């Protein structure tokens, strides 16, 4: 009996000792686990409705889709700041640019332009008599023609009758010289030469078809008729461009107008000839502002006897200016801006060394071609997203941050705070 009492006493002492050694530790571990669970409390969101935030998994109350784990706020970031991975940046081709007047380098301004035909050298070849085009000798647009070249032959009933009048008048020119001169002058008005008129008079035969000769040399830029067409006197047949000189038209923004004047030197480059630079001078500044682009045209005339410049070619011009305005308005590419009705927003890269972004509302001014003036919201030196803006906005929405569709965003918090 004493033996059993000893065994029971040893067992009780063991249980007591085990409780003393491990009981408190277990309680502490449980408390720690609970605290850690609170610290790492996972929030759940909907991929289609990122503003939905729940403390436990389930279904979206709007669309019924299963909720997914929401990304936790990175330590130290503001309520509406979020970070993207470098891999995500590369996959989405997200690009950023520094805000500021990037077009001015020292005292040099870069302008974008385009080669166009020299309108002063353009000509419209017309028919000087009515009739039917029996043969058109110009085959295609872009064909080179020379002055005096045969362009077409035309059958003209009026000219046919006028030739008969000439033959009849030539037989009575001694008795009625005034009538004879009037008939000859009538043919001259139809641009027949003295030689052609003399030939008709000498042969005594009426020609059925008459030639039309080119009055200038150049390139056919447009065919306005086809063979077999009936035409009227004075009707245009061809548009002819003389491309020995061309214009380079550049767009000058409204706030830059006072920097330019006629006679300034322009250095012109083009992708077609990357190692060449062409010199010219400003010959014309349009006195009328284009109200759609808020720009004026600045023009230079380029020598093009070797056919280097083709109409439609893009060029870049660099002009040294004497005076720079003290305050140039900030311009940003239109690709950087998202519109939400009344609001215009961009995404600001707040850390130059890390891909951390934040929504920024801006007040836009004039539309300057592919850019916008920024009246408020940005400063020189700010770095903004200029490519992949919609992708960045989608990332903001998924993380519950202020975005194009979510005006309020979240509160400032860390991973130790409950959502």
Image (cartoon, helix red, strand yellow):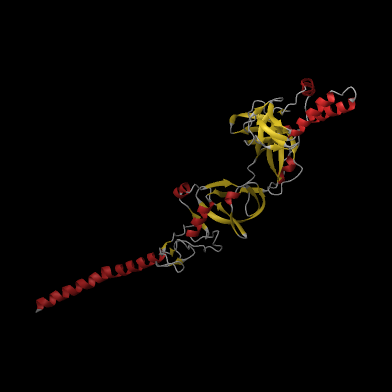
Q: Residue at x 81, y 25 (%)?
A: 167
**Residue 307 versus residue 362 in the image, above or below:** above
93 lies left or right of 170: left
Q: Which of the pair 129/412 is nearer the observer? A: 129
Residue 71 percent across, percent down from the top left: 44, 59
Residue 330 percent across, percent down from the top left: 65, 48
Q: Which of the pair 264/42 is nearer the observer? A: 264
293 lies left or right of 189: left
Among the 4 quarters of the image, the one containing residue 225: top right
Which quadrant is the N terminus positioned in?
A: bottom left
Q: Residue at x 87, y 23 (%)?
A: 173
Q: Which of the pair 99/114 is nearer the observer? A: 114
Q: Residue furthest bottom?
A: 1
Residue 73 percent across, percent down from the top left: 47, 59
**Residue 306 versus residue 132 in the image, above or below:** above
Q: Residue at x 23, y 70 (%)?
A: 17
């Amino acid at each position: 009996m004493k033996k059993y009492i000893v065994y029971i006493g040893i067992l009780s002492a063991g249980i007591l000792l085990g409780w003393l050694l491990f009981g408190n530790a277990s309680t502490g571990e449980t408390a720690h686990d609970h605290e850690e669970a609170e610290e790492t409390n996972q929030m759940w969101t909907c991929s289609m409705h990122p503003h939905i935030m729940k403390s436990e998994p389930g279904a979206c109350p709007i669309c019924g889709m299963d909720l997914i784990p929401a990304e936790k706020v990175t330590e130290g970031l503001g309520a509406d700041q979020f970070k993207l991975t470098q891999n995500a940046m590369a996959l989405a081709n997200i690009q950023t640019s520094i805000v500021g007047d990037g077009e001015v380098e020292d005292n040099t301004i870069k302008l974008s332009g385009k080669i166009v035909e020299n309108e002063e050298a353009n000509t419209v070849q017309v028919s000087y008599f009515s009739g039917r085009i029996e043969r058109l000798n110009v085959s295609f647009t872009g064909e080179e023609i020379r002055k005096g070249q045969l362009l077409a032959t035309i059958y003209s009933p009026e000219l046919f009758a006028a030739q008969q009048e000439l033959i009849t008048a030539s037989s009575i020119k001694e008795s009625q010289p005034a009538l004879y001169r009037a008939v000859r002058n009538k043919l001259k008005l139809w641009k027949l030469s003295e030689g052609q008129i003399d030939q008709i008079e000498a042969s005594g035969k009426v020609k059925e078809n008459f030639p039309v000769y080119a009055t200038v040399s150049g390139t056919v830029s447009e065919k306005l008729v086809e063979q077999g067409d009936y035409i009227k006197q004075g009707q245009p047949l061809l548009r002819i461009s003389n491309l020995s000189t061309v214009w380079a038209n550049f767009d000058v923004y409204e706030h830059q107008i006072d920097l330019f004047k006629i006679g300034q030197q322009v250095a012109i480059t083009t992708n077609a000839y990357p190692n060449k630079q062409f010199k010219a001078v400003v010959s014309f500044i349009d006195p009328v502002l284009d109200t759609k682009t808020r720009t004026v045209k600045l023009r230079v005339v380029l020598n093009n006897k070797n056919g280097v410049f083709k109409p439609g070619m893009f060029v870049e011009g660099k002009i040294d200016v004497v005076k720079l305005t003290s305050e140039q308005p900030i311009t940003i590419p239109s690709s950087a801006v998202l519109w939400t009705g009344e609001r215009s927003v961009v995404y600001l890269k707040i850390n130059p060394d890390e891909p951390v972004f934040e929504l920024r509302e801006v007040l836009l001014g004039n539309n300057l071609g592919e850019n916008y003036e920024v009246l408020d919201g940005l400063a020189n030196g700010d770095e903004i997203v200029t490519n992949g803006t919609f992708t960045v906005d989608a990332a903001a929405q998924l993380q519950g941050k202020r975005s194009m569709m979510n005006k309020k965003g979240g509160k400032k918090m860390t991973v130790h705070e409950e959502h």
